[in-house]
Image (cartoon, helix red, strand yellow):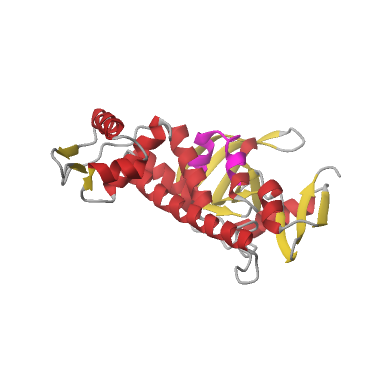
Amino acid sequence: MANTSSRTLRLLSLLQNHRYWPGTELAERLGVSPRTLRRDVDRLRELGYPVAARRGVDGGYQLAAGAALPPLVVDDEEAVALAVGLHLAAYSGVSGGQAPAIGSAGHGAAKAVASQATIAEASARALAKVTQVMPPRLRRRVEAVAAMTERATWEPANGSAGASLIDPRVLTTAALACRDAERIRFDYTAASGERTGRHVEPHRLVALDRRWYLVGYDLDRQDWRSYRLDRLAAPNGTGVRFRARELPGADAAAFVRAGVQSTRTGYDIEVIVEAPAPVVRERIGRWASVSEIGAGRCRVRMTADAL
């Protein structure tokens, strides 16, 4: 049985997408007894959701017509986590953004592709629902993060892991500045440890492997730069708007990739593995690109600091 919190969210989702649910059918969908269902409905009412009940043989539940749902109670950090996780999952593909052809893949690979599509679609729906019931202040921040982020990582999990190391205020301030075309100032610590102040026209956020970057035009250095968000501190908007400049590259993700590749000192690794691609992808796909090259064989590409 699902835990109480996740089951309550599932109940709310069902009530939002169906005008009226017979009690027996709703309990069956949730995998609980009618008594447990009544307790879950009472819990939603305590949270402020107007659930109407009809008694009798054909009794059931529905959300009160025309009632406004209460705001989702989350703080800034939780809102950013929701936005990052759901956004990256919604726009992800199977390893490297490329789904293997179902027609040429085995049953396992086809199932993996279908599961990935289902998760992506569900994440997109969840992001839309969660954003709708957020307070306006948080909704504005969440929408900015989703709209201003380009994904350049092999797996969405990598981007989510990198975001967990970033101050939510840094992420949301940078996203809002990108969206509003507002110049910002911040402190930045270089790889050498040197800390400097920066004055930047922000362009886009990029999630690449396990790092997040801000791409922008550095006004002091008169050139385009990419900044690791985990090294960026105390960002503040200046209130000064700017006209977008032409980025030297196909897009922000390509710009960051080119910069990372030019300074990388690790190893490029390519391995032929005698195992089906879905099995290998499930075990190490988070850290690598896995592509099928034949029945029971696949090619794995990755980068690493040490062999």
Quadrant housing residue 70: top left
Main secondary structure of the magenta stretch:
helix
Q: Nearer the viewer, residue 213 or 1?
A: 1
| Residue bounds of the magenta highlight | 159-174
Q: Residue at x 30, y 40 (%)?
A: 27
The x, y position of residue 89, in whole percent, is 52, 50
Q: Residue at x 51, y 58 (%)?
A: 117
Q: Is residue 236 left or right of residue 129?
A: right
The x, y position of residue 101, in whole percent, is 62, 69
Residue 97 in view of the camera: no
Q: How many marks?
A: 0
Figure check: 50 above or below 116: above
Question: Magenta includes 163?
Answer: yes
Q: Is residue 123 left or right of residue 257?
A: left
Figure check: 72 above or below 183: above
Figure check: 288 above or below 10: below
Q: Nearer the viewer, residue 185 or 281?
A: 281
Name of the residue lying farthest toward the bottom: 103
Q: Residue at x 15, y 46 (%)?
A: 65
Residue 6 in view of the camera: yes
- Which quadrant, please, contains the C terminus? top right
Q: Residue at x 55, y 39 (%)?
A: 185
Name of the residue lying farthest toward the right: 307
